[in-house]
Image (spheres, grey):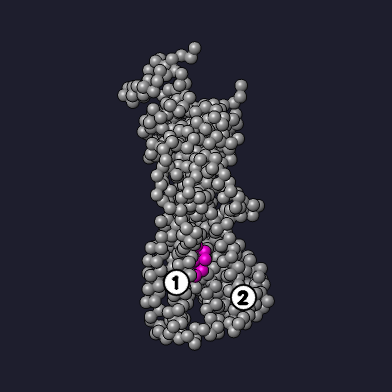
Amino acid sequence: MTAPMIELKNIVKRFGSVEALTGVSLTVRKGEVLGLLGDNGAGKSTLVKTLAGVHAPTTGEVWVKGKLCNPWNPLAARSAGIETVFQDRALAPQHSIVTNIFMGREITNVLGLIDTKRQVEEANRLMREIGFTSKVFNPDSVVGNLSGGERQGVAIARALYNNAEVIVLDEPTTALSLTETQKVFRFVEAVRNSGRTVIFIGHNIYHVYDIADRFFVIDRGCEAFEGEKAAFTGADHLISMMHQLAETGRADVNSLRRPQ
Amino acid sequence: MTVIIPEPPKTAIIDNRREQSAFRRFYGVNGRAVNSFLAFIAVWLFFASQNWGLFLNPGFYGAYLFSIPPSIIIVTAMVFVVTAGEIDLAFPAVIGSGGGVFMTLLIWGLPVIPAALLTLVIGALLGVVIGAIVVYGKISSLVATLGLSFFIVGIVNFLAQGKNLELRSAVGTWGNEFFVGKWLIGGMQVPNHFFIALIWVALMYVLFRYHRFGVRVQMVGDNPNSARQMGINVERIRVGVFVLSAVSATLAGIILVQTANMVWFPLSGKAYLLPVLAALFVGGTPVWGGVGTIIGAVFGALTIGMIPSGAVGAGFAGFWTEFIFGIVIIVTMVVHRFSGTRLS
C-alpha cells in the first residue's frame, strides 16, 4: 500500500498557555477532496496553518508521502508540494499579479536576478489555463485594484504553479459573489479530475458537503469525528451531527452508516 | 499535468472598467520617480531664474558634485529600509564609526584601498548587530535605532576621547586619488567619488527592481504575513536591509574622511540625519512601506542637496534655506499623495 499523501501524527500546538490543537491525527489520501469542518475557534485555522507550515507543531510529526518533514515551515511545505490558498489570500496589494504569483519563488538566474520575461510568460499561461483572463487586467496589473474574486484567482493561480500535489483552500468562497463561488467550485472539480488532492475548509456546510469526498470535523482542538460521504445520509445528517456536537460536546457517531 | 479549463460562467459578468492606457501603466509604476524628477527641475528652475548666468555655468556645480555623493549613497540604501517597513536612525552614528575605523586602520599603516574594504566588512558586521537587535529583539526600529545611535556615538566618542583623527601623509596617495581624484569634464570638476556614487546607484537599482532580495524586501514591506506564509524568511530580509544601510553609511563615512583631506571628526555623520530622510520622502518613497523608488530617491537627494548652495546662489539670505526646505518637502509630499500612483 502506498503511503498517504499527508499524515499528521498527534499534533499539539500551544500558544503560550492556550492549547489550540490538543492532539490531532489526520490522514489525507492522494486524489481525494477532504472537507475540513469545525465551529469558530475549534482550531480549524490553526490546523490549516500547520498544514501550510506557517505554524510548526509544538509536538507531533508531519509526514508527507511517507517521509518525516523536519523542520516544518512554509518553505518545507511548498517544496513538499503543498500549496495553500489562505483565507486572507496572502497577497501583496501594492504589487503586480506576476510578482504575487512568484512571491517567495521567483524565477532567477544564479546571481539571483529575476527573469521578468519568463515570469510574465508563465503567469500568462497559468492565468489562461484556469480561465482567469480579462481585458481589464494583465500580469502587470496591481493586485490592489482587482475585485475580491479576481484576487482569489491570483491566489489560486499561484497555488497551481509548479504542479502542486496538494492544494489547501481555506474558506475560498467567503466574500465571493454567487458566480465567483461557482467558479471556485468548477476549479476544485478540475483540480480533482487532474488527480490532485484538495483540502477544502468552509463555513457553509452545504458547499463543503457538495464538493468533498470525506469529512473531518474538529472541535475544541481535537478530532470530533470523520467519515466518508457514503456514511452520511445527506448534508442535513452532517449538519445535525455538528449541532449535536456544539450542544453536547459529542456527536452520535453510531448514526454513521457502516461501509458495506 | 495540465489543469482542465473550467467552463466559463453562463451569465456574463458586467465589467465597466476600462483597460489602462500605456501611459497610465508607465506612470503607475514609475510615477513617483517622475514626480521627484519634476520636483528637482522645478527647484532648479526657480533658483536659476534668479541668476541665469551663475546657474548655467558648469563651474558652479563642482562643489555640488563634491558634497552630494554621501547623501546619494545613503538615501538609496534607505529606500530598502523604509520599503521593508522599517526605519534606520542609526546611520549618522555609523557614518562616524565607519570613518573612525577607516582612519584608525590607516594610522595603523594599511593602504587606503585595503583599509576601505576592511572597514566596509566591519560596517556590514555592525549592520548585522543593529538588524539582529531590532528584528530578533522585536523592538520598533524607530526606537531601537535611535537608542543604538546614541550608543554607537558614545562608544566612538569614548574610544576617540572626543578628538579628531588625521593622517595628512595619506593625502594624494594612489588610494586617496581613487576616491577623490577630480576630472575636468565640460568645465565641471567631477570627483571620483561621484562616479562611485553612480555605480552604487546602478547596483541599488538592479538590486531593488530585478534581484530576488529587492523584490522580497518589497513583499515584506507590503504584507509581512503574506510574505511569511509564502515561505519568505521575513527576519532575514529585515536584517538584510539594516546591513545594507550600515554598509552605505560606512562607505559614506570613508568618503567623508577623504573629502576632508584625511581628517575625521567623531560627529561627522550628524549633519546627515534630516537631509537624508527629507531626500528619501521628497524622492517619493512612501512612509507606509511596500514600494519605493531608487531613481526617485536620487532626485530627492539632488533636490535637497541643491537647496543650501542654490538659495545662496540665487541671492537669498542664508536663513531662507530652511524655509525653502519646508516648502519643497510639503509641496512634493502633496504631489506624491495626489498623483494616484500604483493604487488608484
Q: Nearer the viewer, mark 2 or mark 1?
A: 1
The quadrant the C terminus of chain B occupies is bottom left
Q: Name the amino acid type tagged 2.
A: Asn
Give the residue at x 31% y 24%: A247
The stretch in magenta equals: B292-301
The residue that mark 1 highlights is: B39
The residue that mark 2 highlights is: B192
Compared across the picture, whether B116 is left or right of B303 comes to right
The quadrant the N terminus of chain B occupies is top right
Q: Chain of mark 1?
A: B
The rendered magenta stretch, by its main secondary structure, is classed as helix
Q: Are marks 2 and 1 in contact (CB under 8 Å)?
A: no
Residue closer to the observer: A225 or A16: A225
**Quarter of the view holding residue A128:** top right
- Where residue A87 appears, x then y in whole percent? 43, 40
Q: Secondary structure at mark 1?
A: helix
Give the residue at x 58% y 40%: A162
Q: CA distance from mark 2 to mark 1?
A: 27 Å
Q: Residues within 10 Å of mark 1 (few under 14, many from 20)?
A: many
Q: Residue furthest bottom?
A: B53
- Residue A68 showing in the rendered view: yes
Q: Earlier in the sequence, mark 2 or mark 1?
A: 1
- Where residue B206 appears, x then y in whole percent? 58, 60
* Magenta stretch: includes residue A164: no
Compared across the picture, whether B215 is left or right of B170 comes to left
Give the residue at x 66% y 70%: B113
Residue closer to the observer: A239 or B29: B29
Q: Name the amino acid type tagged 1.
A: Ala
Residue B178 vertical placement versus A33 (above, below): below
